[in-house]
Image: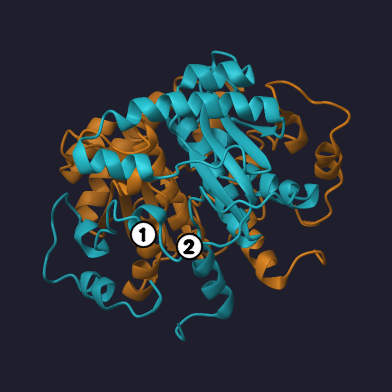
Chain colours: A cyan, B orange
Amino acid sequence: MSEISQQLENLYQVIFSRRDVRSQFLPDAVPDAVLSRLLYAAHHAPSVGYMQPWNFLVIKSDEVKQRIHTAFNEANEEAAGMFDGERRELYSSLKLQGILEAPVNICITCDRNRTGDVVLGRTHQSDMDLYSTVCAVQNFWLAARGENIGVGWVSIVKQEQLREALAIPEDIVPIAYLCVGYVSEFFDQPELEKAGWSERLPLNDLVYYDQWGRQGEEETLGERIINDKSFPNL
Amino acid sequence: MSEISQQLENLYQVIFSRRDVRSQFLPDAVPDAVLSRLLYAAHHAPSVGYMQPWNFLVIKSDEVKQRIHTAFNEANEEAAGMFDGERRELYSSLKLQGILEAPVNICITCDRNRTGDVVLGRTHQSDMDLYSTVCAVQNFWLAARGENIGVGWVSIVKQEQLREALAIPEDIVPIAYLCVGYVSEFFDQPELEKAGWSERLPLNDLVYYDQWGRQGEEETLGERIINDKSFPNL
């Protein structure tokens, strides 16, 4: 990566080595100093109309975690039943959460009414507040990777059970339920790729020019993408 | 920030100094080498079930940009009418996009059917594919900041006009329309804060413990957040 500075190389390294962690959590406590920095990172996400619609529920109670874990198990059993044959077997063999092992769980929510009815930038795209909150999740996740802390996003859980376990009101949308903690290792590939669930798509196939579906031969960017040597370890 | 490594400090610096850019775009071309890296960063976002539901439309055509700009103007006029009095005046004084000035525009979309009907992790939360795509947007945005490239997210535009201008099919959801380019400066604060539109919320007010709304005095994290000296420039 001689083309770019060490500083930039470090940033890309964090982006490329971020993982969705399920099985490698260590019991070591995450210091308040570190959690505070991660929350500051999340809080500095972009938000539509500067709405900052997020809240952060920091969960350390074993009882609360246990309730979420039970809700996960119920949903996960339903989920397994939706796949067929070999796919179902592979699905059932995957560990898809670390709720109880991770020392901290964090639920990031979106308050859809935070700044009133009319929000700058949300007048023609009402989901922008949800998207803002996802940006906060991704900031949190990348900062965590920088701190050598693993994060796993648990989405296999029914919203109403999550609400109930955390006493989340009706007008608040839970966006992400995250398991957070130090890890024994970060895998070099996404876990679903390692497990043979699916493969990374070739980036160049996903890039169009000026109009949907257009991939002209005159495009030098496409060639660059195919031959990009910036990241030899990808 | 003596508590953390230089490498980590650089990461937080990128996160905290990222801006939504509207007015500071320079006409300088963004090299293919840089665009390629930004797209690799986006493509390495987390995605539900490793779905990778995103596409990237790279827009340089003046004609296409012009169409989007017209759609923005129409929506923005409607939007201004939704605010009252002083608020409307302030709204109308804000420049909210750099579509024509930015040398590149990029539309990031979500293909909701990319990997079939049943997607691991999406069985109980159907919007996870949209959220994955937003993570790609945020990866792109942070990598861009690292490359000293400004990004502005244009959300004040009707979806059907965006689709029409870019020939985006019905089953594909446009998530973000981004203006991308080098800039004359990055503001030290979010533009809406600078303009007096609204203020940053105190982080500690947004953090709850184990249950929605709970902020116990026994919580040492709250104290740490209030007294965090990691980032003296925030």
Label 2, on which residue?
A187
Which residue does the numbered mark 1 point to in the structure image?
Answer: A194
Residue at 41% in and 76% down: A233
Residue lying at 84% horizontally and 44% vertically, measured from the top left: B224
To which quarter of the image does residue A84 belong?
A: top left
Q: Position of residue A140 (x, y in %)?
A: 60, 48
Left or right: B112 with respect to B212?
left
Tell me where residue B65 appears, x and y as whole percent. Answer: 27, 50
Question: Mark 1 or mark 2, which has the lower sequence index?
Answer: 2
Q: Residues within 10 Å of mark 2 (few under 14, many from 20)?
A: some
**Toward the viewer: A49 or B135?**
B135
Horizontal and vertical percent for residue A18? 50, 58
Q: Residue at x 88, y 28 (%)?
A: B217
Residue furthest toward the bottom? Answer: A2
Inspect the image, locate mark 2, and give the three-letter code of the amino acid beneath it: Phe
- C-alpha separation, residue under disc 1 versus residue under disc 2: 9 Å
| Position of A156 relative to B34 (above/below) | above
Quadrant where the N terminus of chain B lies? bottom right
- Location of residue B14 by image quarter: bottom right
Residue A227 picture location, percent across and down:
26, 78
**How many residues crowd mark 1 within 10 Å: few (<14), some (14–19), many (20+)?**
few
Q: Is residue B115 visible?
A: no
| Amino acid at dot 1 | Lys
